[in-house]
Amino acid sequence: MRTPRWIRPAAYGVVVGAIGVAAVGFTWGGWVTGNDARTGVLSAVEASRTELAAEICVGKFLAAEDASERLAELQSLPTSTEQREFVESGGWAFLMPGDYTVARPISDLCATMLSDMGLPGLS
């Protein structure tokens, strides 16, 4: 059995075209491997978990009777480390179920959100 002469060039064209499509897809098309997709999802989950816990922290902080005085005290602290420690020691940082200590990113974000707030009555 003889194969037609056009089979070899057509096969090469299919292979080169597939490689080209894959290269363009992964470079500019936004294609990712399964592992990259999993890593991205886990990172997004962790970020949203941290943001939610920080929002709860801010809510607990602002619900206190002396919130405006505490907010002024927090905002007067010179470094973000001192602000984070202030939030942690005050017990406002949200402790995730199953955790025994507050995750540092949660208290950092909570302190940042609080320090960026305007003082009540000074808007």
Image (spheres, grey):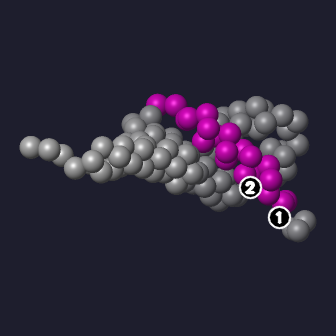
Q: Is residue 68 left or right of residue 1?
A: right
Find numbered disc 2 in the image and state the secondary structure of the residue it sits on: helix
- The 10 Å Cα crowd at callout 2, few under 14, some 14 to 19, many 20 or more, is some
Q: Does residue 70 appear to the left or right of 107 in the view shown?
A: right
Q: Secondary structure at mark 1?
A: loop
- Asked whether, in this view, residue 38 is left or right of residue 27, the answer is left
Name the residue located 52 percent from the left edge and 49 percent from the top edge.
24
Determine which residue is flagged by label 1.
120
Q: Main secondary structure of the magenta part?
A: helix
Q: Position of residue 53 (x, y in %)?
A: 55, 49
Is 115 one of the magenta-colored residues? yes
Question: Whole-percent x and y of residue 10?
Answer: 33, 50
Write down the region rendered in magenta. 100-119
| Closer to the camera in the image, 18 or 83 | 18
Give the CA separation, mark 2 to mark 1.
9 Å
Q: Around disc 1, counting alpha carbons within 10 Å, would you say few (fewer than 14), some (14 to 19), or many (20 or more)?
A: few
Residue 110 in the image, given as x and y percentages of width and height: 67, 47
Mark 1 residue type: Pro
Q: Is residue 46 magenta?
A: no
The label number, if any, that marks residue 36 in the structure image:
none
The residue sitting at 39% across, 48% down in the picture is 13
In front: 103, or 121? 103
Q: Which residue is mark 2?
A: 67
Residue at 71% x, 33% y: name it: 85
Residue 4 spot, x, y in % from top left: 22, 50
- Compare residues 123 and 91 and report the one nearer the observer: 123
Q: Is residue 118 visible?
A: yes
Q: Quadrant of residue 63?
A: bottom right
User: Which amino acid does the dot numbered 2 rest on?
Assistant: Ala
